[in-house]
Amino acid sequence: MAQKKWLRYAAMVGATSLALTACSSSDGVDEVQLADTDCDPPQAQASGNPSTDPLKFGGLLPQTGDLAFLGPPEIAATELAVKEINEAGGVLGNPVSINQGDSGDTTTNIANQTVDRLLADGVQVIIGAASSGVSLNVIDKIVDAGVVMFSPANTSDQFVCYPDKGLYFRTAPTDVLQSQALVQMMASDGVQRVAVLARNDPYGAGLARNTERFLQEAGVGSDQIELIIYDPNAQSFNAELDRIAQFDPDAIAVIGFDESKRIITRMAEIGIGPQDKLVYGTDGNMGNALGEGSAPGLLEGMKGTAPQTALSSDFEERVRATGAEIGLNLSDLQYSAEAYDAAIITALAAEAAGSTRGVDIASEINGVTRDGEDCTTFAECRDLIAAGQDINFNGITGELEFAPAGEPGIGSYGVLEFGPDNALLPVEDYIVVSIDD
């Protein structure tokens, strides 16, 4: 049976977060820096001019780029949500639709092109992006158009105080929570000396700096932590890995995306890979795609965290069936629950607002996830709203309890591990971290 371990800590609004400023690190990389998140996040206000036009979603999810492995489960889950909303009668009596588009990654302009197309199509809500860096590239364009942006996978703390007009939301918990879960995993393995190797973007640098902070709070001395921020577009990572080898840690955390495959291959070549050291990953690389094409047994024993709850077999069957219907092979289901819940929350917020106008939907999103009558499906929750009741939607991801910044106040993380065939083993344990408001 899957086991859950609870961590609870007081996360003041002033917890550290990323800002898009930079300074030169010891590696010569201009590293994005941590900043204070002490703010009152902006809140959307109802327009006073409701619209009952049919609800149109846009998808901004990775079909190409360094997070392309996340695209299929997220796309299938949003298609499933739209299908089930329509089977239950649609939103405000009208069928809903979704227009899928590619987000690419930060090395391309694909996301901007997709957003332009979706806005021209008249969508009121865009689900995506998966990459925090991609979202930061397009968030202003989306919210300035009065459209809701709802990510199933952004984890950077940069969004907590972002001036988003109260129109940005996410179902993935912030990296303040994931770094706590990662450090708890390391502590349970008895780690005393740690190297953290992270990509230089809002996701990687922020998660790395929070991990460093929580390692120190857990009693690991600053002189026992080596943090290296790397350029993910570099031709080689040899210098960074040679530095780690010289440091000779007990454990190495690799916080990256698709480039992690090259990094770990080189680690094995110089004797610091998963067969030699405790190696950890996070949600950006802990997927079966990491093992595709790798040397046999390369990843065996590598552990990591990713936002995850125990999925019911019924949901797994539904989302896999939907994927098959639209020609997607789902080797992973990572972030499928978060993508599904984002669509359902949006639809319920539209019902609560009596409007499909973006700002009206946004004004109700936080409220439908907390402080009301518990419900777990669109149809059940919609009927409660119609009866005049406040609702507390508990989705596929479990309790949500959105905080004022439009994000979960609870994070559940799967304790992931690769087996001898470079594939992830079935998840047996979860670490649940919550913010005491």
Image (cartoon, rainbow, N blue to C red):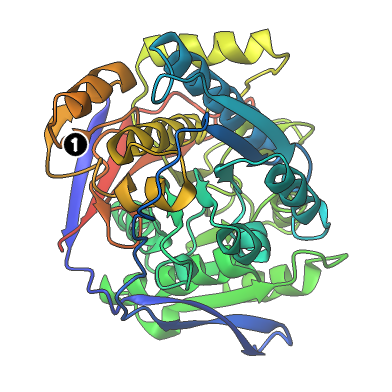
Where 62 sits versus 330, above or below? below
Residue 138 drawn above or below residue 289? below
Does residue 95 appear to the left or right of 377 in the view shown? right
Dot 1: element: strand
Between residue 207 and residue 277, name the one nearer to us: 207
Q: Is residue 428 above or below residue 285?
A: above
Where is residue 417? Give x, y as percent.
48, 36
Please tell me which residue is depicted at 31% across the width and 81% down the height of the picture: 38
Q: Say which quarter of the image contains residue 122.
A: top right
Residue 151, image x, y percentages: 51, 47
- Residue 57 image point, x, y percent: 57, 35
- Residue type for callout 1: Asn
- Residue at left 64%, top 25%? 421
Q: Which residue is mark 1?
A: 392
Between residue 51 and residue 220, name the one nearer to us. Answer: 51
Label count reads 1
Q: Residue at x 77, y 44 (%)?
A: 117
Neighbourhood count class around disc 1 (C-alpha, 10 Å): few under 14, some 14–19, many 20 upward: many
Viewer can see residue 1: no
Residue 341 seen: yes
Q: Nearer the viewer, residue 323 or 215?
A: 323
* Residue 253 percent across, percent down from the top left: 53, 59
Q: In what quadrant of the picture does the C terminus appear? A: bottom left
Q: For this rendering, which residue is in front, 305 or 131?
A: 131
